[in-house]
Image: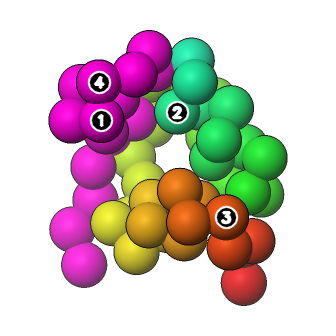
């Protein structure tokens, strides 16, 4: 799967990067900045409320 940067995800969803970072961190992903890359499957898991495997 392709990876996307946090700031790209935020732009697509129309929310601030800080909010995307908070959602990903709450789901257990180690992201620290808007330039961090995240796998697309992990993005879906985090936004659907599924914890990190």
CB contact under 8 Å: marks 4 and 1 = yes
| Nearer to us: label 2 or label 4 | 4
Q: Point out the stretch of residues depicted in magenta.
A: 1-17
Horizontal relation, residue 50 to residue 13: left or right: right
User: Dot 4: what SS?
Assistant: loop
Of the image marks 2 and 4, the number of the one nearer the N terminus: 4
Q: Residue at x 77, y 57 (%)?
A: 28
Residue 40's quadrant in the figure? Answer: bottom left
Horizontal relation, residue 1 to residue 48: left or right: left
Labels 1 & 3 near each other (Cβ < 8 A)? no
Query: What is the quadrant of the C terminus in the image?
Result: bottom right
Pointer 3 residue: 49
Foreground pick, 51 / 30: 51
Q: Position of residue 7 (x, y in %)?
A: 33, 26
Q: Residue at x 57, y 18 (%)?
A: 18
Q: Position of residue 44 (x, y in %)?
A: 44, 67
Picture disc at residue 14 = 4
- Would you say the residues marked 1 and 2 are in contact, meaning their CB atoms lie under 8 Å apart? yes
Q: Residue at 40% x, 74% y: name it.
A: 41
Q: Identify the disc placed on residue 13.
A: 1
Looking at marks 2 and 3 on the same chain, the residue that comes earlier in the sequence is marked by 2
Residue 20: assigned label: 2
Which of pointers 1 and 3 lies earlier in the amino acid sequence?
A: 1
How far apart are the alpha carbons under marks 3 and 4? 18 Å
Residue 17 picture quarter: top left
């Amino acid at each position: 799967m392709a990876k996307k940067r946090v700031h790209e995800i935020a732009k697509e969803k129309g929310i601030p990067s800080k909010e995307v970072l908070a959602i990903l961190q709450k789901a257990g992903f180690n992201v620290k900045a808007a330039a961090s890359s995240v796998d697309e499957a992990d993005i879906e898991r985090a936004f659907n409320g599924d914890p990190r495997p």
